[in-house]
Each structure stands twice: as C-alpha cells, then as structure tokens.
Amino acid sequence: MSKHDTPLLDELEKGPWPSFVTDMKRQAAKKPECWDILGQLELSFKDRITHWKHGGIVGVFGYGGGIVGRYSDVPDKFPGVAHFHTVRINQPASKYYSTENLRALCALWEKYGSGMTNMHGSTGDMILLGTRTENLEPLFWDLTHDLGQDLGGSGSNLRTPSCCLGESRCEWACYDTQETCYHLTMHYQDEIHRPAFPYKFKFKFSGCPNDCVASIARSDIAVIGTWKDDIRIDQAAVKEYIAGKYPANAGAHAGRDWGKFDIQKEVIALCPTGCMSMNGDKLVIDNAECTRCMHCLNVMPRALRPGLEKGASICVGAKAPILDGAQFATLVVPFMKVSADNEFEELIDFIEKVWDWWMEVGKNRERVGETMQRIGLPTFLNVMEIDPLPQHVKEPRSNPYVFWKEEEVGGWDRDIKEFRKRNAM
Amino acid sequence: MGYDPKNPMEGRITDLGPRKYDNFLPPVIKNNKGKWLYHEILEPGVLVHVSETGDEVYTIRVGSARLISIEHIRELCDIADKHCGGYLRFTTRNNVEFMVDSKGKVAPLIADLKSRGNKFPVGGTGACVTNPVHTQGWVHCHTPATDASGPVKAVMDDLFEYFGSMTLPAQVRIALACCLNMCGAVHASDIAILGVHRMPPMIDHEKISGVCELPLAIAACPLGAVKPAKAEVNGQEIKSVKVNAERCMFCGNCYTMCPAMPLADPDGDGIAILVGGKVSNSRSAPKFSKLVIPFLPNTPPRWPETTEVVKRILVTYAKHAKKYERLGEWAERIGWEKWFELCEIPFTDKSIDDYRLAYDTWRTTTQFKYTSHIK
C-alpha cells in the first residue's frame, strides 16, 4: 500500500479545527492501510458518492452483534480497505478511561486493525474502524482475555446503554447514572449480544432534566433524573448573585457584556410556570407549581439545588425519523426511585414488561415508540398496568372517538327485533 | 495462548461487559462522587467543580475530530499521564476532558495543549458552538447522502471563534447525520446538517433475486411505492420489484433492506438544513429541528454553500436572540415567518409538511406577522 494523491482531502488540512486528514496521514506512517482509507475517501470526494458496499454479515462466534461488516467497492485500487469492518467496544460508563486501558486498546487496534477509531459512536461505544474478517476472532480473544473487555451491541438487540457523567462530577445528578448504566449493562449481556428483538432498543440515563445524553430524543427507555420535594435554596447565595458577586449561569455567558445580572428578568420571568417571586430580598418558589425544568438551577447553581427526594422520570419510545417521523420519548412513569439498594428492581420490572409486550406485538423493524403509536398509548398503559394520568398527555384528546370496551358499556348484546318494537323504521 | 482457529470455542470468554467505571475515575472524582456542590466556567473550556468536602476539580475541555487515530489517542494519554495522573474522559459530544485537582495545574496543562499545534483546541463550554455530533459519511458508511467528517471540519473551521468563546445567547448544538437514518440524532439540534437523497432507487434486476428478500424490500417502503413486478434478465422472466417514483420520499429504507436498490447519486444527493431543535427541558420542552433549507449540493472538499448558510444562521441568531434563548425558542418567539426573513432564507413549499402528522404544523389562527413574504 502506497500513498495516493489526495488534493481534495489536503484542503481539509487547512484551517484551525483539528484535521482528521492530518491525523490519518500521521497514522499511515505506522499503519500503511490508512493510505488506502485516504485514497478511497479522496475518490468519494471526487465522485461525490460512497464507495462502501452494502452490508456484509460478519461477527464472532456466539454473538449476533458488535461487529459491522463493511467491504470496499473498489478493492483492487485500495486493497488495504478491501475489508473494513467496524468493531464496537462497550465503553466504560461516562467514558472515563485510564491511560493504561486506552493504551492497551490502542495496542490491540495496532495489532489487528487500521489504527483509526471514533471516540465515540453516537450510541456511546468506542468504535474501532476498519479490520479484516480473519482478525475478528483473534481480536475478540485478546479483548476478552487480556483486557477483560467486551463488544457492544448492533442489530436488533439491546444497544450499548450510555449515561451522562452523573454524580461523578455533577451537582444536579438525581440518581447514580453510572451505577444504573453499569448494572443494567451487566444484567442484560445476553440481550446486548444476541439479537432477539423486533428492532434495536436503547437505554440512556441522564441525571437531570438537562438531559446531557439526549435520552429523551433517542432512547427507547429514557431514565431522566428528577426530584419530588422542594428546590433547596441558599438565600445568602441568592444575594451574592443579585449583587453580581457570583457569575450567572456559572459563567456560561461571560464572553459578552449582557449587562448587570437581573434576577427578575433572567430567572423569575423565564420560569415557564411563573412559580418564582421575590419577597423583599428573599427568593420564593412555589414548589407545587414547579415543573423542574432546571432553568433557575442552571442560572444560579450556587444558590439552588435539586430537592432531596430524588429519583427519575421514565419516558418511552424516542427515535430518529425513519420511518414514521421522529419521536420524543413519552412520559410514562412520572417518578420512580432508582436505587442500587434493591438492584434497580422497579426499573428492571418496568423494562421487562415493555419488552414482553413489544416482542409480542411489535412488527419487524418497528421501534417500541412506533408500536405505541400504532396500538395507542391507552393500550400501552393498560398493558403496563399503569393508571392513566393527566401527566401522560399535553392535553386531552379533541376528538370523541373513544375505543370503548364492551365491559365498560355493560354489554353490547341487543336484539334488533326488540328495538323495532319500540322504534319503527 | 491466544486464539486457536482449530478450536474456536475452547477457552472462549463471553458476556464480560464493560470494565467497571470505578476503575477509571481519577481520585478526586472518586472521592467526591455525589458530593459536588456547584460548578463554574472560569474561562472558555475551563470548568471548576467544588465539592462539599472542599475539594475542587478543574476540567479542561478540548475539541476532537471524533475520527481519530491511535497515535492521537496515545498523545492524549501522554498529556493525561503528564498532567492528570493517568486519567481522562470523553464527552457525549466527542470532546476530551482533562481533569486536575488543583488550580496550579491548569496553566501548565493549557500551555502544553497549546504547544501541540491545532490538535487540542480548548473550548466547548457555555454559550458556545461545541463539538458537532456526527456520523461516518463516506469514510465508512454504505448509505450516506453526504460525507460527515469533511463537512464538519469545514463548518468548524468557519465557526472556530465560537468554539473557544462564550458570546452567544445560549449554547448552540450543531449535528450532522449523513442520511435520513440519522445515526447522529440530528432531529433535536439547534442546527442540523442532514444528508438527503432526491432520486428514487434504481433496480438491479440482475442481482435482486440473489441478494434480497423481495417481500422485505416491498414492506420496507412506508408509502407503498415499491411493488412486486416481473422483469426480464437475459431473456428470462424473473420476479423483481418496481418503484412508483412519484410516491418516493427518498428515505432509503428500501436500500437498507435490499442492496439491489441503490439510490445514492452525485447530483441527486446533498444536504438539508434543519434548525431549532433542543433536547434539554430547560424553560421550554424538547423540540424537533425544523427543515428550513431542503437542499444544498454536495461540494467537497469544503461544502461552501453549507458553511455559508450555517454561519449566517448562527450570526443572525447571535444578533437577535435574547440571553438564554435557544435558537428554536428565538424562532418561536419572533415567528417562523420573521425567522426566514431575518436569516434571508427563501421559504419554499418544501418546508410545509405533507407527511404524517403534518396538520399539527399548519397555522390555524389569524395571528401572523406581515413579512416580505406577503406581497
């Protein structure tokens, strides 16, 4: 494998943002197949179309996911990428690494792959980008035996769960997202590695309604931290914010002169429920009206903290647009305790109830959110044995087409002859 | 002993799962887990978190291309070994975070990062444009309608000043997905760059029976545009499919199910721009991104049409939005008609929904603004 001319890609070595082209050229010194990645990508830049063939099922024995097959459609020109399979490695929760572990992963990938990676894939896995079929089993052997690590998910299975950094470095985490993510990942190893679902299924764990892992937008079950009791207020700190001694929004707006901090304008008036006011120099929150949107906490992190009775809201059914259009996850359980003390029993029961139903009624390649749309939220709640709540909807329905059940009406059996005796036609 | 191809199942270990996270937490993080009191952004890319124990952790956030080499990762490790006790982390948006346990260690770390060319830009905090979430594009994907790393590099070169500063009304999340599958989850981003196809699939009758389950290809179409049909190959009649092109919405789902139905094309494919999405529940509920530009051409290596319009939208937002207002909140406050006018983006019928649930987006009130659209 030798260097190819890459005049188009070379243009992407210019400019201030880190260049993947420069990086790949640097890697090519040790891993010459990177010249063929660059060569084929240059051809795509010239032809304005991909040069990867459709699919290709490869994997390791006993697993139905974790490796994505990929082959070049111009292998004669670029033999170094004739096979270019992806290996998904389950990332540690919140993506903290020791350099010892990262270096071991690098050595593994130097031995068996192209040397290129994605840190990380959208779902959360560490993505090792480009290897040959014959390398897969030896790589998996070393990964499990020497590094004590494992593949992530792909295909119609539980995809690799992911979480925000939670309590590890955030004052707003309302449950331990890392422990929850780790525990459930370990609990569901079979579901991650052996596809048995109608389609993909994702869990994501966010510690608060800021939702830094975008769980409400892209996971089939989104576990989003929240609290039940009152926002904790440090009135002395409120005064410091008003006096301009603490930076508003934790300094996030420091690059522009927005004028002096104005608690009325920046906090109280922006509260979506209007549940805040000043009583003299004291901040008052009508907590019964609060919807825990996080705005006031975000703006005054030193003065306001989540309450002490913490848990999570469970939302179900988010997905990207393919096929029926994008969906956010729907609030199903307003508040659930999420705790390692009972090994997340309540959450696990919930998850398995969703799976039992979806695996029964879900169609091939139908995400659970689409199944819910097709069959209806009332039926879903009924199956889940969850009482309907006004919190489940933005507003009540505006059409009267209720699917009454026979038993709700007291029976549907009637006799037309009896009817005609009273009501002539 | 390593893998033995003659006895592939012997000694096999499976279902190990990931290494437990607490193997990888820096001591200051481990000691203060669940005890953090508050945080502050000291300067762009530099955060301090303060614990109730009195401990502090300083985080230096740097951008990365996401598509990175093991040489690059090793350099990250060198930096973390030298300054951070051998630990680092990655964020959901592909940034890298170096953490140190005292303020004195911050300046030497930043000086080290800055001495290494443009590989480690410090920023991505607060009211900024942080690292775009993106997909594979032409570097690895078989269904893309555009590249991913290329347009992201071009866009971020153009918006670089906004990565390392905090001058915007709120954070601006940019994301790119190279086709409608949206692996990059761009559907809830402030500015979404989306690869789109515009030509219906071709049918490779010679190959289709060998590579496809025809009923799956037919069922894959959400609009029933793929129908069973007979075709002739080398004088023989074979079972194949036909596509009603007028019904096709170019989603590419048929190609996902059937490799004999490719729809990618150099001129048919390009980029759509969607704006105004958000994920956080802060103030307003999460919002979907809305389609404001249906098509821009694929123009490698630097996609000038895309970079120009992304910057124009960003600059217009920066000028007009109020403090804290996300792009979508601003658009809703002023009204989308005003938004199109201010951003100087022509409004076309392509922005009017005619798919499922379309009616929810049609205006059913007499409240509107008189903009230049009304002649």
Image: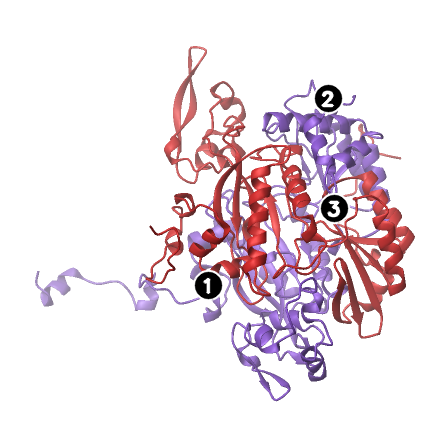
Chain colours: A purple, B red
Q: At label 1, which amino acid type do we have?
A: Asn
User: Quick check: marks 1 and 3 in contact, CB under 8 Å?
Assistant: no
Taking the view exactly as shown, the residue that stands out farthest to the right is: B82
Secondary element type, mark 1? helix
Residue A79, label in figure: 2
For label 3, the residue is B64
Q: Residue at x 59, y 65 (%)?
A: B324
Chain that bears disc 3: B
**x, y percent for residue B215:** 45, 32
Q: Quick one: B103 or B322, which is closer to the camera?
A: B322
Please name the residue shown 59% across and 74% down the image.
Answer: A267
Task: Point out residue B240 in the picture as x, y percentages from the top left corner.
Answer: 43, 24
Circles 3 and 2 in contact, beta carbons < 8 Å: no
Query: Badge 1 sits on which subunit?
Result: A
Residue A65 visible in the picture = no
The x, y position of residue A94, in whole percent, is 74, 56
Residue projecting furthest to the left: A424
Which mark is first along the chain, 1 or 2?
2
Q: Are discs 2 and 1 both within one chain?
A: yes
Q: Report, in whole angstroms, how far the alpha carbon at label 2 lies from the one at label 1.
A: 56 Å
Q: Which mark is residue A382?
A: 1
Alpha-carbon neighbours of circle 2 within 10 Å: few (<14), some, or many (≥20)?
Answer: some
Q: Is residue B157 above or below residue B140?
A: below
Q: Are marks 3 and 2 on the same chain?
A: no
The label nearer to you, 3 versus 2, is 3
Instruction: Kindly identify the amino acid type of the residue bearing the numbered disc 2.
Output: Pro
